[in-house]
Amino acid sequence: MLKRIKSSAQTGAIGKSLLMPVLTTVAGGAVGALLVTTFLTGPDKAPTDLTVSTTQTQTTPGTQATENAAAAPTETEEATAEISEKEGEVAVAAYVAPAAKNLNELTKTVSVSKGDTLMKVLTRAGADRTESYEAITALNEIFDPRSLKIGQDVTLYFGMDDARESDATAPSLIRVSLKEDVDRQLAAVRTPGEGFTAQETVLELDRKMVRAGGVIQSSLFLSAAQAGIPTKTIVDLIRIFSYDVDFQREIQPGDSFEVYFERFADENGTILKEGSILWASMTLSGKEFSVYRFKTDDDGFTDYYDEKGRSVKKTLMRTPIDGARLTSGFGKRKHPTLGYTKMHRGVDFGARSGTPIMAAGNGTVEFAARNGGYGNYVRIRHNSEFKTAYAHMRKFGKGVRKGARVKQGQVIGYVGTTGRSTGPHLHYEVHKDGRQINPLSVKLPAGRKLGGKMLAAFNAYTGQVRQEVAGVELETQLASIK
Ligand SMILES: [Zn+2]
């Protein structure tokens, strides 16, 4: 069971009082406890989801428990309003018999350290192992345990819960909560008899569009950072243009850029996070490229497209050679010359010596020389993610040297058998994030060209975006978040 609670940033101090499970121990209820859990959407609203659960022990008369249950919610609301002052955190209030514990003793916040699992964190905070396990199991419905971050706070709420048959005097774990993002709070909450339930609270933030830009002095990164553009946005910007622009070589002083992106703010207007870039433009040596973020409804993918509706991603060729046949695949194999089994980190294409080899995609040559067992070897950097490498060449293509810019399909060399090789073939590798991957099975960045209805929809959309951008003032100095 999962409860999703949406909250709006506009309706006041809701972020602070999203969810208030209130533990009520009824006065005089030494023999029975009453747990009232109230979920509020705001302090100024009536509870929208009020659950009153009564748990009785054999010694408590049923009628008494019911009366208490009916009376409790009003008190609960008051308690909630008081507690909501507590800074940014969901609090638990205890309505207690005089002898019972105070609030501080019931709430514990623990910070995640290196090597921690949620189980370690909870048990370190004093929670019972079984209860921790139950809470974590519920939480895992909405939380990926691998996303637990060092320094992240986990808050535990304990309560006296006589309903538990085990050690009734020890405080039981009632709730575990953690903030997964500035606008997303996750919790596992226990209801007697039902165990833990996952709850997700999403704070709806205000979207603010920003148009920023500037002239590139030395590098795009530096100029964008100087303009106050957040790092995440700059990295996105570079990635979007990485298939078309060689940031090491093509940027000249005086080139300029503009970016139109989302930011999200809370009810006080404080920016909490960055969103997506909707439009960006770069003017390089007087030539302007614009890209638009666009979702194609037919397949549901969102990608960046140029003015003509072509995806900025350029597909890398899986087979950068014509008329060749695959002679050795990717993976473990018995090495033909060394005799032992080793990992083959590329694919081999058998071809006649002298057959032209093409660049699998646009990029910059970062290596073109003799390279040990690889023989004559070329490696091309396509963008921050992908590189391709070509080995055993007889000779290099015209103009192919370190630093040269190559276009997809350009001849970069010719099949040979230089280096450790038994016969003429191309050994071809695709590197993703620095590791060789199987070019024949991996999903390579696929570029799409919009056509028909989708292109018409795109054109209508880009017209709208251009109009929108024109209506927003260009900022050359943004205030940063931190
Ligand atoms: Zn090979």
Image: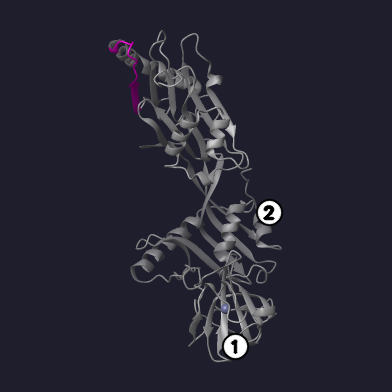
Determine the CA span between mark 1 and mark 2: 46 Å
Horizontal and vertical percent position of residue 37 = 39, 24
The residue at 50%/22% (across/down) is: 83
Residue depicted at x 38% and y 68%: 455
The colour style of the image is one colour
Tell me where residue 278 appears, x and y as whole percent: 49, 57
First reached walking from the N terminus: tag 1 or tag 2: 2
Mark 2 = which residue?
A: 226
The three-letter amino acid code for the residue at tag 2 is Gln
What residue do we see at 63% from left, 76% from top? Answer: 379
The stretch drawn in magenta includes residue 426 = no
- Frontmost of labels 1 and 2 is 1
Residue 14 in view here = no
Residue 121 visible? The answer is yes
Res. 414 mark: 1
Q: Position of residue 195 (x, y in %)?
A: 39, 30
Magenta-drawn segment: 48-62
Classify mark 1: residues with Cα within 10 Å, few (<14), some (14-19) or many (20+).
many
Label 2 neighbourhood size at 10 Å, few (<14), some (14-19), many (20+)? some
Which residue is at a point 57% across and 62% down the rendered structure image? 239
Mark 1 residue's CB less than 8 Å from ligand 1: no
Front residue of 86 and 394 = 394
Is residue 60 highlighted in magenta? yes
**Residue 449 against residue 198 in the figure, above or below:** below
Q: Identify residue type, mark 1.
A: Tyr
In this picture, residue 456 sits left or right of residue 431: left
Which residue is more in the foreground, 33 or 361? 33
